[in-house]
């Protein structure tokens, strides 16, 4: 039985060692570019939502927590829908969502109920452009119009040397291999925006939505990382993902024809132009946007996705409201929006940013 | 009722009927019963919760939940059903079971009866390693390695065995029911193998030695003694494996192309399951969407239940037959 | 089968010997077939996981790590997983084992036992996300408790208990009836028989079953998503506040569009496998050392 005693001691010693040998102090490059924003804040906020903005939030958390070491922000990238549900249920202080609260599903009313005295507002914070990635060795700068895209993703255009694609890419030698179109097998805001774009600019026959229409066929892969891997490993593949995934994997991106007839390449600026032309359909401080995918603004890349932070204008407990306000001020600040560029997002255009800042100032 | 036999100092046996259970016994029995009842309570709570969440969605459904193939709970007219999903769950799980069980039983036999004694412990541990791999890793491995790797063998199967409906079809891709079933088979193999191994190790040596003494070869001994003895245990193990396969969420979600058709052509770009659908739809689901997913979870429950009941029936009937014949 | 009269040893007829050899080959083949995917998976995990297999990974959390930064680690996830798995085992093993004891020893054949057995079968098929949803709805929303490691442990228990019950039930049934009857005949009360005779005899099998269950729940992601929530920082307290878990960590990092994150994901996966293997080893060592066979009785 002495072995049992020794084993127990060893186990306890091991546990104690384990408990003391970890640290939260991570020093990384870039920790010097923070601007202190009233550094004495303490507390914890839980948030959840879109995974498209996960990288942006990670970067913002880093700088915010460097300036306010007493604050803990936990953002769970579980998906826009899950984020909204968690917000309505009251378990998170704000939600990140690729689409604003949906009236048809009664979400604004439910969110208002959670906010008790106040209203729930949608604050656009991140522009995530959607890149059309493809894998055709030797064919760079492929140009595609919405009509051709619709044909490809609807499994009507099946080979790369189809006349429609040839017409848009004169002088480019296209191989005669089959097109393998990949779409998201899981529901996502990216699919939602992509299908909305197709519906608005071509004769895409299906209702846009977060779930890919099964009649359009093609192959499904889970997550933007799944599509990226699938396109990377399959010659002749085409898919749609957020810009950050395309950049990280070094994949070829197509130039898309916008409403003005130009084939525009995807850059943070060209994506920003489309959002500039967007109409604000929310009232007061609710800045819900209606994106015009068929925009004819010059140099605008039409396939964009805007991620909103959804929170209560009034009605959060005082502690939480203070932290949420401070964090959102940070994300909407110039430094905050600057970081977006390097991460494969686009910053908000100036006019919209002003309105967002005004709205944040009213949070209490 | 145990009868205590006590011997007195003079060697006379005194019989004393023990009708009273001791305190220890009472407490122990209480604990055991309480555990059973706790389990029931948990199950009841889960069932109530699931039904409560599912009902609003089911009521809003405009199609037959059990036969409808598509899944659109968020459309203006919600239309969703588990037809394709249940089919996919059953097909992929049974394929996985068919592929895993023979191999698992073989492995268990190898470790219990064929391998050198000292090696057997190490080998058992090595197979248990398969169980230690988390499901998300199997999904990542499946999606990044197996999916491209399986295309050639799938094409081979399609070309030469395409006359079997299972391997037929025009398109052969990596993200298919076949690939997902293989990953599931690998995941449930250690469960079936480990429990079968333990069962085979418990076969009374006397029976084995009796067979061997009568001149049986090793295989004949196994066939006559080990397998019949171990059959209920192996079936139980297989049921545990099947339950795991049917409920596996993340690994298959990373491989399935998430279509909503019913097709026996496992090499083609079709495949979905109830659990994978939950994984795919959950993050973005609205209230109604969630309720629909939970309703599909309820159906999965019922399917697991039916399969397990069938298995228990088979075991019971075989046991009765064995007793009657013996 | 006709036994040859013992006038001498006759060699086994060729056909039977061939069958025996054939089966031997099949069985070895089965083993090889089982090892191949294991090696393939482990090879992939080790090859990709070695990149970040450094001290920093094991001692740092992810607090303050930006989107594209290298560095950071999984300490918070390791602590979280260990605490959650420990709590889960503490809840599940007693309940599961006692239920199995009830089914085999006390209730066998009775109506309650049949109902319990029925529901255990149902429980084995619960999708992991449903277990998480239930605890979210019941413990966190209805009872208003915070996200915590304990909530995660509750969700994982729902998944672990049926596996423990089913496997323990099988192992207990395998204990020969004569052992029990011998004990009763000697006047040992029932509970003592179970504790001193049945359980020790079945111990290696019980340990196998428990370790299988632990291995399964240690790798579950979906229940953790809904109950322990998510955090980048270290939280040693499993009863208050969000924690992190290794499967969550792997799942989250693997989906990010940054190579540094994907490296961390693979190392996290490797760590998880190592932890489960270690627990397995320790449990087996204890079982072997405590088993009656070893003690020579």
Image (cartoon, coloured by chain):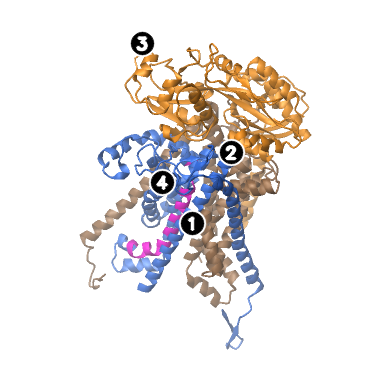
Chain colours: A orange, B blue, C brown
Residue B110 percent across, percent down from the top left: 37, 54
* Residue C211 lies within the magenta run: no
Instruction: Give how far apart the Cα atoms at labels 4 and 3 are.
Output: 47 Å
Relative placement, left or right, of A178 versus C140 is left
Answer few, some or many: residues within 10 Å of disc 4's Cα (few below 14, many 20 plus, some between 14 and 19): many
Q: Main secondary structure of the magenta part?
A: helix
The residue that mark 4 highlights is B92
SS of the residue at dot 2?
loop
Instruction: Give how far apart the Cα atoms at labels 2 and 1 are.
Output: 29 Å
Foreground: A344 or B193?
A344
Q: How many marks?
A: 4
**Figure quadrant of residue C54:** top right
* Pointers 3 and 2 in contact (C-beta within 8 Å): no
Magenta stretch bounds: B222-251
* Disc number lying in front (2 or 1): 2
The residue that mark 2 highlights is B286
* Residue B230 lies within the magenta run: yes
The residue that mark 1 highlights is B305
Residue A209 percent across, percent down from the top left: 52, 32
> Mark 2 and mark 4, same subunit?
yes
SS of the residue at dot 4?
helix
């Amino acid at each position: 039985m002495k072995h049992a005693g020794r084993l127990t001691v060893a186990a306890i010693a091991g546990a104690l060692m384990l408990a003391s040998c970890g640290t939260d102090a991570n020093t990384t490059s870039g920790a010097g570019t923070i601007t202190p924003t009233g550094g004495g804040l303490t507390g914890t906020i839980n948030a959840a939502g879109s995974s498209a903005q996960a990288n942006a939030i990670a970067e913002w958390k880093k700088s915010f927590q460097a300036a306010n070491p007493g604050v803990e922000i936990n953002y769970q990238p579980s998906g826009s829908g899950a984020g909204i549900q968690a917000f309505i249920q009251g378990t998170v202080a704000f939600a990140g969502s690729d689409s604003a609260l949906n009236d048809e599903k009664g979400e604004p009313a439910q969110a208002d109920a959670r906010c008790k005295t106040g209203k729930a507002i949608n604050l656009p914070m991140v522009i995530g452009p959607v890149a059309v990635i493809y894998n055709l060795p030797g064919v760079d700068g492929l140009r595609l119009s919405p009509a051709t895209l619709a044909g490809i993703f609807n499994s009507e255009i099946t080979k790369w040397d189809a006349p429609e694609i040839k017409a848009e890419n004169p002088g480019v030698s296209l191989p005669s291999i089959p097109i393998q179109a990949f779409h998201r097998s899981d529901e996502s805001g990216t699919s939602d925006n992509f299908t909305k774009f197709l519906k608005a600019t071509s004769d895409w026959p299906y209702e846009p939505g977060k779930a890919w229409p099964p009649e359009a066929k093609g192959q499904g892969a889970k997550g933007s990382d799944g599509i990226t891997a699938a396109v990377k490993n399959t010659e002749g593949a085409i898919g749609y993902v957020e810009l950050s995934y395309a950049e990280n994997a070094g994949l070829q991106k197509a130039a898309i024809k916008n409403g003005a007839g130009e084939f525009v390449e995807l850059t943070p600026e060209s994506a920003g132009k489309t959002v500039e032309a967007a109409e604000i359909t929310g009232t007061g401080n609710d800045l819900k946007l209606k994106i015009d995918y068929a925009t004819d603004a010059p140099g605008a890349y039409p396939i964009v996705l805007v991620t909103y932070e959804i929170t209560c204008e009034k009605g959060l407990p005082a502690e939480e409201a203070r932290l949420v306000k401070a964090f959102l001020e940070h994300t909407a600040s110039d430094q905050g929006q600057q970081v977006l560029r390097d991460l494969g997002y686009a910053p908000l255009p100036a006019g919209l940013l002003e309105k967002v800042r005004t709205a944040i100032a009213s949070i209490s | 009722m145990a009868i205590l036999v006590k011997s007195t100092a003079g060697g006379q046996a005194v019989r004393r009927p023990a009708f009273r259970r001791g305190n220890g016994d009472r407490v122990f029995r209480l604990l055991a019963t309480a555990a059973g009842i706790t389990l029931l309570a948990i199950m009841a709570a889960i069932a109530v919760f699931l039904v409560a969440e599912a009902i609003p969605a089911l009521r809003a459904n405009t199609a037959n939940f059990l036969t409808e193939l598509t899944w659109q709970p968020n459309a203006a007219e919600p239309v969703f059903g588990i037809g394709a999903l249940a089919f996919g769950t059953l097909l992929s799980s049974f394929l996985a079971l068919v592929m895993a069980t023979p191999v698992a039983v073989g492995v268990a036999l190898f470790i219990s009866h064929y391998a050198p004694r000292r090696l057997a412990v190490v080998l058992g541990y090595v197979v248990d390693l398969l169980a230690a791999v988390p499901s998300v890793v199997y999904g990542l491995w499946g999606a990044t390695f197996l999916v491209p790797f399986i295309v050639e063998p799938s094409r081979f199967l399609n070309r030469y065995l395409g006359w079997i409906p299972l391997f037929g079809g025009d398109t052969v891709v990596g993200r298919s029911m076949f690939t997902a079933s293989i990953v599931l088979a690998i995941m449930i193999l250690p469960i079936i193998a480990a429990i079968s191994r333990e069962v085979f190790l418990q076969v009374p040596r006397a029976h084995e030695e009796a067979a061997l003494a009568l001149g049986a070869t090793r295989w004949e001994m196994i066939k006559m003694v080990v397998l019949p003895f171990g059959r209920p245990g192996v079936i139980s193990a297989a049921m545990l494996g099947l339950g795991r396969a049917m409920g596996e969420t993340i690994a298959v979600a990373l491989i399935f192309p998430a279509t909503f058709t019913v097709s026996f052509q496992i090499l083609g770009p079709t495949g979905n399951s109830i659990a994978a659908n939950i994984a795919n739809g959950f993050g973005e689901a609205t209230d109604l969407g969630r309720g629909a997913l939970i309703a599909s979870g309820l159906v999965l429950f019922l399917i697991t239940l039916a399969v397990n009941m069938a298995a228990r029936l088979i075991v019971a009937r075989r046991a009765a037959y064995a007793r009657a014949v013996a | 089968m006709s036994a040859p009269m013992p006038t001498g040893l006759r060699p086994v007829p060729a056909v039977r010997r061939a069958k025996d050899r054939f089966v031997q080959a099949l069985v070895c083949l089965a083993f090889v077939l089982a090892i191949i995917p294991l090696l393939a998976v482990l090879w992939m995990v080790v090859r990709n996981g070695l990149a970040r297999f450094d001290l920093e990974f094991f001692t740092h959390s992810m607090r303050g790590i930006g989107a594209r930064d290298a560095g950071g680690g999984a300490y918070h996830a390791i602590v979280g997983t260990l605490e959650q798995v420990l709590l889960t085992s503490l809840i599940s093993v007693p309940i599961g084992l006692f239920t199995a004891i009830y089914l085999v020893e006390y209730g066998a054949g009775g109506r309650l036992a049949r109902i319990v057995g029925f529901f255990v079968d149902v429980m084995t098929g619960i999708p992991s996300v449903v277990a998480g949803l239930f605890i979210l709805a019941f413990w966190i929303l209805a009872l208003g408790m915070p996200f915590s490691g304990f909530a995660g442990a509750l969700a994982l228990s729902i998944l672990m208990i049926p596996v423990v019950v089913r496997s323990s039930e099988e192992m207990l049934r395998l204990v020969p009836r004569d052992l029990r009857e011998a004990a009763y005949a000697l006047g040992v009360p029932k509970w003592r028989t179970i504790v001193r005779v049945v359980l020790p005899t079945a111990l290696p099998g019980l340990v196998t079953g428990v370790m299988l269950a632990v291995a399964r729940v240690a790798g579950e992601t979906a229940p953790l998503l809904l109950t322990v929530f998510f955090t980048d920082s270290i939280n040693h307290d499993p009863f208050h506040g969000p924690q992190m878990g290794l499967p969550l960590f792997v799942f989250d990092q693997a989906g990010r569009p940054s190579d540094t994150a994907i490296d961390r994901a693979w190392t996290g996966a490797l760590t998880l496998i190592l932890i489960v293997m270690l627990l397995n080893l320790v449990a087996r060592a204890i079982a072997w050392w405590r088993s009656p066979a070893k003690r020579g009785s």
